[in-house]
Amino acid sequence: MAIADNNRSTRTLYSDPSCASCHRVRVVVQEKQIKVTIEDITVGNWPEDVVAANPSGVGPTLIDRDLVLFDSQIIMEYFEDRFPHPALLPADPAARAQIRLTLHRIDRDWYSLLNNTSGSEKTRIAKLKKTLREDLTVIAPLFSASEFFMSNDFSLLDCSLAPLLWRLASWNIKLPDKAKSVTEYAERIFARESFQASLSEAEKGMR
């Protein structure tokens, strides 16, 4: 899957087509229509230069000329700074800080469970399923308070939440009726052109 053409030699995103962390970066790419070549790579099949560039072993990896970035949240914020339109963070410093704090919590509480390489995958997924089901049920009212999550404007929060919500079905996570607002929010986000364009073939088969 690739966007653009002549920038292949200067800006390349190495992305696992089934990785949620990679997916949220691809949502940002599509939302901002960034010219970047997207190269599909899978666990255990990374090119040597990507392994050397990204010692964490966790995707995605962005190579932009001489710059190498390999944390999904850092890459998203780099794209936000580098390509400010359309804005995915508010102009107000306090509102930006609030969104960054929430992004940090999403990373700490949810994405960290996906990216943690210790223990068995079965145990990690079981913990993730329990955490997501309980947390999303508790915060469900926030999803109906505004058009997007904690904002009336589409933001990096929505880019981060959408890949997780898209995967709920494949993880056999069924939310209770009192979390209906989460499901309704998810369907609004999934209908966005940018989100649909961000999906890999593997991700299209998750629902």
Image (cartoon, grey):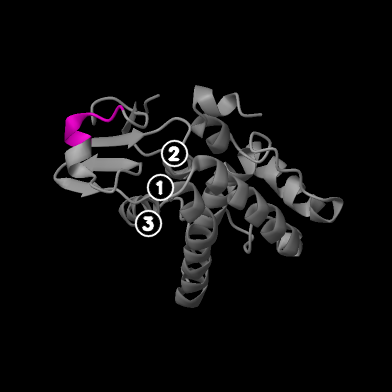
Say if residue 148 shows up in the picture. Answer: no
Residue lying at 52% horizontally and 65% vertically, measured from the top left: 105
Q: Which mark is residue 77?
A: 3
Q: Mark 1, mark 2: which one is toward the viewer?
A: 1
Name the element at disc 2: helix
Q: Which residue is mark 1?
A: 117
Is residue 40 depicted above or below 58 in this figure? Answer: above
The answer to which of 147 and 124 lies nearer the viewer is 124
Q: What amino acid does circle 1 point to?
A: Thr
Say if residue 191 shows up in the picture. Answer: yes
Q: What amino acid does circle 3 point to?
A: Glu
Question: Magenta segment: does it hold 49?
Answer: yes
User: Distance from label 3 to label 1 (Cα)?
Assistant: 24 Å
The answer to which of 85 and 150 lies nearer the viewer is 150
Question: Magenta segment: does it hold 99?
Answer: no
User: Distance from label 1 to label 2 (Cα)?
Assistant: 23 Å
Name the element at disc 3: helix
Badge 1 crowding class, 10 Å Cα cut-off, few under 14, some 14 to 19, many 20 or more, is few
Q: Quadrant of residue 40?
A: top left
In the rendered image, residue 90, in percent from the top left (x then y), is placed at 49, 65
